[in-house]
Amino acid sequence: MFQVISHTLASNLAASGTATLSYPSGYDRGDFVGGVDHRLVAFQKEWKAPSDFTLTFNAGDITLTWGAGQTTIPSGDILRVQLDQAGRNSTVVGGSSVDSTVNVSVVQIDLGSPAAADANGYVESQDLTSAGVFSVDTTATAAIASAALVGSADYARNVVAAWTGTAVLTVTGTDVYGNVVVESSASGTSLTGKKAFKTVTDVSSSGNITSLTVGTADVLGLPVFMPNGANVLKELENEAAATSGTIVSGVASVPSATTGDVRGTYDPNSACDGSKGFSLIAAIPDASYLGATQYSG
């Protein structure tokens, strides 16, 4: 369910600027925590959170932050904001709606039996120039296309890399749904990625580096948006209760090259080895929501 509010701007709302909104009468922060489908109408166009703007639900008001790089909305314009209640009042008992309830989907997320992590599964030791040429005298894109380098993982999972010579490494590929994903390291000599890649299509460096390896680790991508690790009710390994792993919720801010996964990830306590099967039982407010638009560069 949704609540719609209108707000007249008292001053210009520039890119990355903020506006303070009031809660609808009779509602407060608790009514909207967990909502994911927030929208805004401005310039006769509909904008979606968090790609175009973000909302922060405070104790007494709401902070709307307009997206970076957006056109300034002039003073006097009316913002119409749709606030997602994540299913509030959707439970019915005896013909009457039950107040303060959220209708969620309890789902089992099957993560398969991923193969063992392979630190050089995409790229075995290679030198790489800032022009994007490997020591095999070809670009990453050409090498992967010709199968000289392996560019696909068995399951969407994070990327790891190591090299000699300080640089920023940028990995481009696709997620489990075929959307382009871009992730960059900090300036240094290694990357332990936070995003789940199903394929890697290109690797580039800010400077000339040597002995580059690129491969996979055990952080597995989730197929639906996980709003909070606490939404996971049970972790399973080979259909039995598993020792707790690490669950990272989906990114609720505007994605960038250095933010986490837009849907969230799961790092099992047991190492992947191709035989262990992992799954999660979770209460998801909106099982059709696949997270914010991936950062694609």
Image (spheres, grey):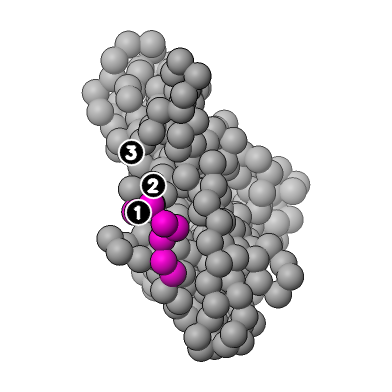
Point out the stretch of residues depicted in magenta. Answer: 21-29
Q: Amino acid at mark 1?
A: Asp
Q: Residue at x 46, y 34 (%)?
A: 89
- The percent position of residue 72, horizontal first and vertical second, equals 60, 85
Q: Are marks 3 and 2 in contact (CB under 8 Å)?
A: no
Q: Earlier in the sequence, mark 3 or mark 2?
A: 2
- The percent position of residue 160, horizontal first and vertical second, equals 43, 50
Residue 182 lies in quadrant: bottom right
Q: Report if residue 26 lies within the magenta region.
A: yes
Marks 1, 3: nearer the viewer? 1
Q: Residue at x 74, y 70 (%)?
A: 44
Mark 1 highlights which residue?
28
Residue 42 lies in quadrant: bottom right
Q: Secondary structure at mark 1?
A: loop
Say whether residue 28 is visible: yes
Q: Is residue 132 left or right of residue 107?
A: right
Q: Are marks 1 and 2 in contact (CB under 8 Å)?
A: yes
Distance from disc 1 to disc 3, alpha carbons, whole Å, reads: 23 Å
Q: Residue at x 41, y 66 (%)?
A: 22
Please tell me the numbered disc located at residue 31: 2
- In the depicted structure, whether residue 189 falls above or below residue 33: below
Mark 3 highlights which residue?
229
- The percent position of residue 269, horizontal first and vertical second, equals 28, 29
Say whether residue 198 is visible: no
Q: Secondary structure at mark 2?
A: helix
Callout 2 environment at 10 Å: few (<14), some (14 to 19), or many (20+)?
many
Of residues 145 and 83, the one drawn nearer to the viewer in this rendering: 83
Of residues 3 and 69, the one drawn nearer to the viewer in this rendering: 3
Q: Amino acid at mark 3?
A: Gly
Distance from disc 3 to disc 2, alpha carbons, whole Å, reads: 20 Å
Callout 3 environment at 10 Å: few (<14), some (14 to 19), or many (20+)?
some
Of residues 10 and 155, the one drawn nearer to the viewer in this rendering: 10
